[in-house]
Structures are given as structure tokens and as C-alpha cells.
């Protein structure tokens, strides 16, 4: 399968999405002890259009982040769950690694094809 220019854009947006997941999880973890802080979350389904939009490069790093609807279980009205945030960090790292490896593989295939051509 040849890597089309639109596929480069999709990989770039996918890597940006993984980075945004990491950013949101890090912000939540930084506010774990802030009274009244409501965790933020980034949902794949809510951002699918931004990921698939190959015509608008400006939207490549614009993703919808919402406030978590989880009910605060603590007395200080903070709903950050450190275990969930750690899981989100791990998910983002795995996503970014997978997209990076896919991009690297495709670029190496293109280099090989150019050398043979």
C-alpha cells in the first residue's frame, strides 16, 4: 500500500490527537488536589471529524475537550481519578508509538522504492 499525501496528514493528526490525550491527562493529574477541579477528557468519537478532515490543516491540532461527567466522590468536589489518568497516559503513549512506527515504516518503504527506481 502506497502512502498518499493525505495519509501523511492523517498520521500527523493522529499523533497530535495522542499528544492531546497526554496533555489533558497531565493537566488533570496536576490538579488532583485542587478543590472543585473537574477532570477534563478528550473523546475519540467527538473528535473523529477533526482526525479525518484532510482538507483543513488548521484543524489538525484542534480537538474538543470536555469536562468529565463523573460525579465527584471526594469531599472537596474534585473528580480526578489518578488511576484513570495513568491509564490515559499509557494509552496515549501506545497510540503515539504505533503511529510513529507506521510512519517510519512507510517512509522506509518509500526510500527503498526511490533507491530501486
Image: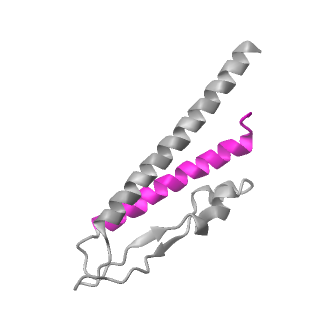
Q: Main secondary structure of the magenta part?
A: helix
Asked whether residue 31 is drawn in magenta, I would say: no
Q: Residue 59's x, y, as percent?
A: 64, 60
Q: Residue 48's x, y, as percent?
A: 64, 62
Write down the region rendered in magenta.
Answer: 1-30
Asked if residue 38 lies left or right of residue 67, the reply is left
Q: Quadrant of residue 105?
A: top right
**Residue 60 to residue 106: above or below:** below
The residue that appears at 64% across and 57% down in the rendered structure is: 51
Count of numbered circles in the view: 0
The residue that appears at 53% across and 52% down in the rendered structure is: 16
Taking the view exactly as shown, the residue that stands out farthest to the top is: 116
Q: Residue 88's x, y, as percent?
A: 40, 59
Image quarter of the N terminus: top right
Q: Nearer the viewer, residue 48 or 55?
A: 48
Taking the view exactly as shown, the residue that stands out farthest to the right is: 117
**Residue 30 to residue 76: above or below:** above
Please, which colouring scheme is shown? one colour
Asked whether residue 16 is drawn in magenta, I would say: yes
Asked if residue 99 lies left or right of residue 86, the reply is right
Q: Nearer the viewer, residue 91 or 59?
A: 91
**Residue 111 to residue 24: above or below:** above
Q: Quadrant of residue 57?
A: bottom right
Image quarter of the C terminus: top right
Asked if residue 110 lies left or right of residue 78, the reply is right
The residue that appears at 43% across and 76% down in the rendered structure is: 68
Q: Residue 84's x, y, as percent?
A: 35, 65
Asked if residue 2 lies left or right of residue 19, the reply is right
Amino acid at each position: 500500500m502506497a502512502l498518499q499525501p493525505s495519509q501523511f496528514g492523517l498520521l500527523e493528526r493522529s499523533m497530535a490527537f495522542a499528544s492531546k490525550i497526554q496533555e489533558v491527562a497531565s493537566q488533570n493529574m496536576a490538579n488532583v488536589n485542587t478543590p472543585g477541579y473537574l477532570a477534563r477528557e478528550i473523546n475519540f468519537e467527538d473528535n473523529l471529524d477533526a482526525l479525518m478532515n484532510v482538507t483543513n490543516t488548521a484543524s489538525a491540532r484542534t480537538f474538543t475537550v470536555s469536562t468529565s461527567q463523573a460525579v465527584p466522590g471526594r469531599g472537596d468536589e474534585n473528580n480526578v481519578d489518578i488511576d484513570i489518568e495513568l491509564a490515559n497516559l499509557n494509552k496515549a503513549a501506545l497510540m503515539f508509538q504505533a503511529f510513529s512506527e507506521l510512519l517510519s515504516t512507510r517512509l522506509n518503504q518509500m526510500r527503498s522504492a526511490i533507491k530501486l527506481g
